[in-house]
Image: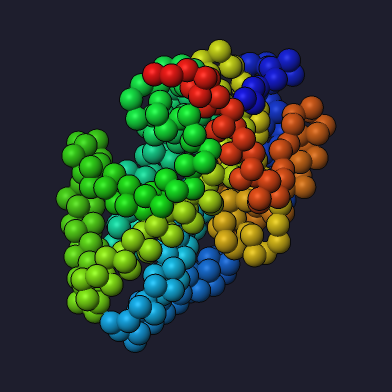
Amino acid sequence: MTVVDTSRARPSGERGSDFAKLSRRIAQEGLLNKRPGYYTARIGLVAGLFAGSWALFAAVGDSWWQVPVAVLLAVAFAQVTLLAHDLAHGQISRSRRTSRTAGLLVGNLAVGLSYGWWMDKHTRHHANPNHEDHDPDVSPDALLWSDNQAEAARGLPRFIGRWQAFLFFPLLTLEGLNLKVASFRALRRESLKNRKVEGLLLVAHNLAYLGAVFLVLSPGKALVFLAVHLGCYGVYLGCTFAPNHKGMPVLTAEDELDFLRKQVLTSRNVRGGRLVTTALGGLNYQIEHHLFPSMPTANLRKARPIVREYCASIGVDYAECGLFESWAQAMRHLHAVGRPLRRVRT
């Protein structure tokens, strides 16, 4: 299991100025400025992909050729979800009201994902990335991410944990459905803002989504279409977010790191060209994104050499690898965490 090397890590009070120095440099380069032209083009392309996928669905009709259409629509849904992510971080608009309104339309109505629930969850992740007590993305709901979680695991997580590295990708096929269920479950929380609006938009999405599928396709083909679409959607999102932190150090209450080290040491960049950047929605520059969440996606690649050089100058490890290696590191970590469970019969 990967651990944090705290020999060079200092409490936030001692090294709090490290991030401030980097932030000033980034601001001087203008990398925090909005990119309306970039997002206008990106939104147009994603909207075209989304609308075009549904148009192709209608044109193909009641045919088994709808299976590849389901895959294409999963890609469209994932790209729309990545846009919702940028909206949640204020990358597109400075106005919180505009961002929230657009987020509700893009998230709840377009893809059936509760924008408010996901934004709250993702905000907590950014505040404490890979922290086993505070990051909801490493909570032991099904998979185990730390030795402490493995020791305390009971029931289904303990059973899955033994071979979780092999089950990771198969389980991702359920993530699309899980996001829809979690979105409706979140409506029961009084802390969720605009619950009625969120609920109405979620219902409208699912009525339109299921209505279109079962209106065009026979029951058997419709069920296959839904399985392929939601399965591929879940795998796409999982393969997008997993390379960012999985297999990186998991923090505990004993780790006292300043903001810069907490964000950099738990994150991993993924090398690749424009194809990787487009497919991952810019999240391949995860270190820069975590340091500057409101930075437009198009500026992250420009910030990378500055951040990397700065981290080297202050002795902070900067992790970066290829896409397949990032998945391999995540799988090796999962397998290592499950090793104690494979030695014990319960």
Q: Nearer the viewer, residue 209 or 146?
A: 146
The residue depicted at 53 percent of the width and 69 percent of the height is: 42
Q: Nearer the viewer, residue 206 or 93?
A: 206
Quarter of the image where the C terminus is located:
top left
Q: In the picture provided, is 88 more to the left or to the right than 59?
A: right
Q: Position of residue 94 (x, y in %)?
A: 47, 53
The residue depicted at 19 percent of the width and 65 percent of the height is: 207
The residue depicted at 58 percent of the width and 17 percent of the height is: 255
Q: Position of residue 110 (x, y in %)?
A: 33, 64
The residue depicted at 36 percent of the width and 53 percent of the height is: 176
Residue 75 lies, with reference to residue 161, above or below; the image says below
Residue 120, by quadrant, is top left
Q: Position of residue 199 (x, y in %)?
A: 19, 52
Q: In the picture provided, is 26 more to the left or to the right than 135?
A: right
- Most extreme residue toward the top is 254
* Colour mode of the rendering: rainbow
Q: Position of residue 221 (x, y in %)?
A: 28, 72
Quarter of the image where the N terminus is located:
top right
Instruction: Tell me if residue 58 can be seen.
Output: no
Instruction: Tell me if residue 323 can be seen.
Output: yes
- Most extreme residue toward the bottom is 59
Q: In the picture provided, is 113 more to the left or to the right than 211?
A: right
Residue 302 lies, with reference to residue 163, above or below; the image says below
Across the whole image, how many numbered discs are drawn on residues? Answer: 0
Residue 260, by quadrant, is top right
Q: Nearer the viewer, residue 40 or 129?
A: 129
Residue 297 lies, with reference to residue 160, above or below; the image says below
Residue 37 lies, with reference to residue 13, above or below; the image says below
